[in-house]
Amino acid sequence: MTKSLNELSITEAASGLRAKEFTVRELWDACARVAQEKNPELNAYLELFEADGSAMAAAQERIDTEGNAAPLLCGIPLAIKDNILIEGHVASAASKMLSTYQAAYDATVITKLKQAGALFLGRTNMDEFAMGSSTENSAFGVSRNPHDPSRVPGGSSGGSASATAAHLAIAALGTDTGGSIRQPAAHCGLVGLKTTYGRVSRSGAIALGSSLDQIGPLAKSVADAKALYDLIKGADPLDATSIDETTYPLRAAKDTLVIGVPRHLLAEGVDADVRTAFEATLAALVEKGHTLVEVSLPTSGYALPVYYVIMPAEASTNLARYDGMRYGKAVRGATLLDDYLLSRSEGFGPETQRRILLGTFVLSSGYIDAYYRKADAARDVLTREYDDAFASCDVIAFPTTPSPAFKFGEKTDPVSMYLEDVFTVTANLTGMPAISVPMGTVMRDDVPLPTGIHFTAPKGAEDLLFQIGAAVTNETL
Ligand code: GLN
């Protein structure tokens, strides 16, 4: 069965363009047409952009003249999360606060994509300011999971995941502060990569938790995730925390890897079907010559509470800039204080307000020692524990999420929603890279729902993640 053009991966589309099987325009039209048709149901995009004829012509020209020397992303239509700035377009972070805010410059990742000739189909829905795991916190309605529209696509990069999984884009960019790329990738059957902290510039990403945030790919294959990663990575003078390839020592390539499995973390709270899929995926890796070792990560049980202290602390600080004065929503009251209160009360949704309250509380002078500083110390312990575990293995594996995609409205109390992140937050707290790769489906209401296997690697070792990810998906990179 031949695929429609919009169903192609980046690598397939790139080779089709070079073989002149179709044009850049035809590839764009295929994606844009299906996006127009299906977006009313999925709400994956908050806005679909007009075709940029001159960018398309330039991409076509480059492929025609440079052939294989043209960048792989040249002429490839992508979906971009609504918290990544594209000059001249609205970037709202799915918040009423920024609903009319137009980006004055390109995020560094966008500059790199433009230089490579990539095209942008639109901006995708998300949880407000990237806080959430379902898109239910968006100020502009939920996005739906294409595998079962009564279920969430995951979040916060749920729109990017829904768009890519439903083939309304060839691939997408998201952001990940505690799992927001990997969790929606798992729920939608995609590959999602959170890079080593600093590997990708954060310049032009609307800040949430500055010591945790990373921009990264949501893609149909490991090869595609790698293609996007190869293009967007690199040190950037506009982001003082960004790093280059020389920051972490390069490891010698190995044919087979040692996979650490922290079984003690899987004992409770993980859905039985997900556990079965996880064990089957590990068994298939062993078949291919990789080995398993048991690792112990005793502090991991504290990762979630640590994250939900540090992340709101940083979020409350970052969100202080939306004061109704400089930019964003401005509501005027009788006094200056009223201006602040009205602008922030009307501009921010309930989850954002909850995190601001939590964040300012844990940073307040009376409680900073009890909460924020303790969490920060625990973060160091977690990092040391992972470093120690990597003495006996190359990567560490667990399921990306404890269960498959849930139904809208199923997790109404915040803590049950926060538990979605139990396996993903540690990579952000430690700054280590992590990938989610599809590991088959589990049945719910007679519908097969995707699940993901999650691998963490030492800092700078993205190559190990691509290697083990490709082993799971049977790709050759
Ligand atoms: N679900 C997590 C949260 O709500 C992760 C968010 C993210 O990675 N942006 O904080």
Image (cartoon, rainbow, N blue to C red):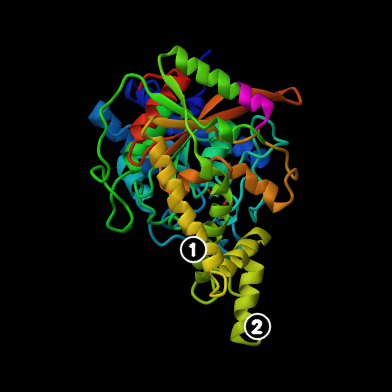
Q: Nearer the viewer, residue 393 or 58?
A: 393
Q: Which mark is residue 373?
A: 1
Residue 333's mark? 2
Residue 249: horizontal and vertical position, in percent? Answer: 25, 39
Q: Secondary structure at mark 1?
A: helix
- Above-or-below relation of 362 to 241: below
Residue 275 highlighted magenta (yes or no): yes
Q: Say what amino acid the circle numbered 2 marks.
A: Gly
3 up-or-down from 36: above or below:
above
Crowding at mark 2 (Cα within 10 Å: few <14, some 14-19, many 20+): few
- For label 1, the crowd category at 10 Å Cα-Cα, with few meaning under 14, some 14 to 19 and many 20 or more, is some
Of label 2 and label 1, which has the lower sequence position? 2
* Dominant secondary structure, magenta: helix
Q: Which mark is residue 202?
A: none
Residue 194 seen in the current view: yes
Which residue is depicted at the point 65% across and 53% down?
137
Give the spatial CA distance, label 2 vs label 1: 37 Å
Is residue 135 visible in this depiction of the protein? no
Magenta span of residues: 270-276
